[in-house]
Each structure stands twice: as C-alpha cells, then as structure tokens.
Image (cartoon, grey):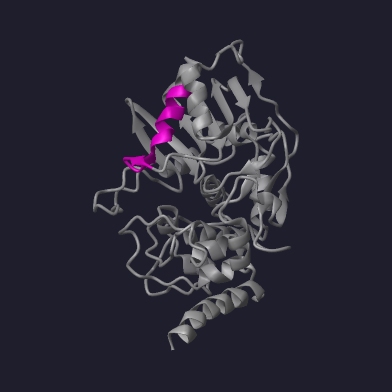
Amino acid sequence: MKKIFKFYIPGVILLTIVILFIQPNPYFRNAIIYTTAGISDHEIFENRTINTGEPQSWKTSLNYNKYILSEEDNSLLKKYESIAFVAIKDTQIVFESYWDGYSQESFSSSFSMAKSFVSLLIGIAIDDGLISSVNDPVSKYIPEFNAREYNITIRDLLTMSSGLEWNESYFNPFSVTTKAYYGKNLNKLVLKAKSIQAPAQKFDYITANPQLLSMILKKVTGLSLSEYASEKLWKPLGAESIATWSLDMKGGDEKAFCCFNSNARDFAKLGQLVLNKGSWNGSQVVSESYLNESFAPASHVRDKNNKPVDFYGYQWWICHYNDLMVYYARGILGQYIICIPEKNIVIVRLGHKRNNQKLKHHPLDLYSWIDLGIKICD
C-alpha cells in the first residue's frame, strides 16, 4: 500500500502539470518557462506600437556628464543592476549613463510605471469631455462589469481602493496576477473580479484597477490604449523614439498595469510633463487641476495599519523626503520616474533590481536615487 501511495502522489502531480501545460491558455506554461518577470519581456509578448510625431531632442546642460561617479555611486548602481540613470534639471540633461549593453535607444519594460501613464490618459480623457468625472461609476462605461454590489467609481480605481478581490502575487504561478501577465483574454479575467469590501476604504494595490481604467479609455475613445497614448502623450511630448505596449495576445488588449516599453530619455519626458504642470511647449497636454488631484494624497483611504494614506494619489506615489515633496512612478524591478518640483529635477532610473525593504511605503533604494540625482544636479 505504501509503495502504491509512493508512486501515486508524484503521478498525480506530474499529470496535473502536464494538463496545465497543454491547456489553450498558456499562462502557466509561460510562468514556468520564464520563471519570473524581466525587463526585456517585451521580446516574448505581442506588442502594439505607440507612434511618435516630430521628435524633440533634450537639450544638454553645460555641465553634461561632468559629474564623475564615485566608488560609492558605482557600488550602489551595480548593487541594483542598473541599466540606465538619467538626471535632468531645468529641462536639460545633466547626466546620463547606461550599463549592461543598454543605451539611449534601448527598450525596457516600465512595469508598474505604466499605471501612472494610464492615470495621465484618464485625466486627458476628462479634459476632452469623454469622461464626465472621476466620481463616475465604473458601470457607466463598462456595463458588463461584474462587481456591482457597490458603486465603485473611477476615483476608487485611481486610488487603489476599489475593494475588489485580487491575488497580487508576482511569484506564484497559480495567482491571478501571473495569469494576467502571461495569459490571454486579460480584460475578461479582470471583469470576473468581485467585491470583497466597500470601495474608498482600504488601500489595496492590485492589477485589476488600472486594467479597468484602460477598458474605460478604450470604450470612450474608440481607440486602443496605445493609439490614445500615441495621440495624447507620445506625439505631443515629441518622444524621440516609438514605444510599444505589450498585449495579452496578437491583436488583443494592452496590459495596462505594466508593460509600456521605452527608453530612459523618453520616460523622462513624462516626468518633465509633471514638472511643467501638464504643459508642453505652450500646449496643455493634461490639465493642471487634474495633476493637482493626482498628487493629493488619498487620505480618505486607510492603509493596512488603518492609517490615512499619505503616500499615493491617482496611480502616482507621493514621498516626503528631507523637506522635499517627491512624486514618482515606480516598477517592481526598480523602474523609477522621480519628479522633484522644488528643485525642477527629473530622475529616471532603470534596472533589474530594487530594494524589497520599505520605509513609509517606499522602497529603500528610492531614497538613494533621489540623493544621487540631487547630488549630480546641484
């Protein structure tokens, strides 16, 4: 009996794995093959192009690349396997450097920085009159939205307080987030999410929220997320290169919660847009009033310690550091667009790693990048 049991259990496990591998939706197979997300994952996904218009090159400072990285700086950059570090002050590049074979033109994934880009597009859609208000219910734009127990609003999605059930695990091959990242029919998956509590109460950083925002944008614009981003962000900002947004399948939908692929110089333009209060070359790309709302802490929402949220707005992070107000977008592997209005500085750091320890909800390496960027620019 023991011998039968000894062979039975491994056999069941093996059969289960085989079944998972041969299923039509390849998410489990891909999760096992690729193990975990990487900054070059755009190479394994289908992508949609985000076109640019007339490229506008950055001006370079008189002090361009005069800063010499110290041994301590190099050690920090190496520790987190950096591929790009760019510092901009007063709209001019003061410093840029690249590693690991990457260059000014090299693409890498934004990961969750994409959430901040989606927020900008929501603000633009409101400015365009396509969305009435952040207080509109999600069901107004997505009638098939499954979670109708509560009146979940666009603001609830923006502030990560929708109350939806979602397992935000990036390293579990069976989690719904893994299925969202590697699988097909992403929007269909998100529409299955159900409410587990009333909205506007608890901060819960989940993939479903920005993906629902992208579905609203697609509905009101009649365009794909990439097409709208091209017309409303990439072309107006004079991005120097096309970008791409990874899809759930060929001809499918953008993974709005991640997977906007570009380079450090063009990512920096989104940070500069923030410092410009939504303006670019005399044109208002996104309204200043929406940005003001975006960077106001969602203090009506409580964090896991039941304290008012003072670190997050509309899909942008908010950090108070050394008497400075810092707004930033971030990705899971240490992708950052850091905006410091008081110093008129934008910092972009891209790489393979970040510090998993946090201080006041912010990864510890964030503070190091702020310090380095200010040191370079001052």
- Is 364 magenta? The answer is yes
Q: Which residues are magenta?
A: 357-373
Q: Residue furthest bottom?
A: 1
Please state if 181 lies on the left or on the right of 321 as rendered: right
Residue 276 shows up from this direction: no
Please state if 244 lies on the left or on the right of 146 as rendered: right
- Residue 35 to residue 192: above or below: above
Residue 245 shows up from this direction: yes
Q: Residue at x 31, y 43 (%)?
A: 310
> Can you tell which quarter of the image residue 29 is in?
bottom right
Rendering coords of residue 231 (x, y %): 68, 46
Q: Residue at x 48, y 31 (%)?
A: 339
Rendering coords of residue 90 (x, y %): 54, 20
> Can you tell which quarter of the image residue 63 is in?
top right
- Is 121 magenta? The answer is no
- Residue 269 to residue 130: above or below: above
- Residue 9 to residue 96: above or below: below
Q: Residue at x 52, y 43 (%)?
A: 333
Rendering coords of residue 177 (x, y %): 51, 62
Number of labels in the image equals 0
- Residue 52 to residue 378: above or below: below
Viewer-closest of 217 and 118: 118
> Can you tell which quarter of the image residue 108 is in?
top right
Q: Residue furthest right?
A: 54
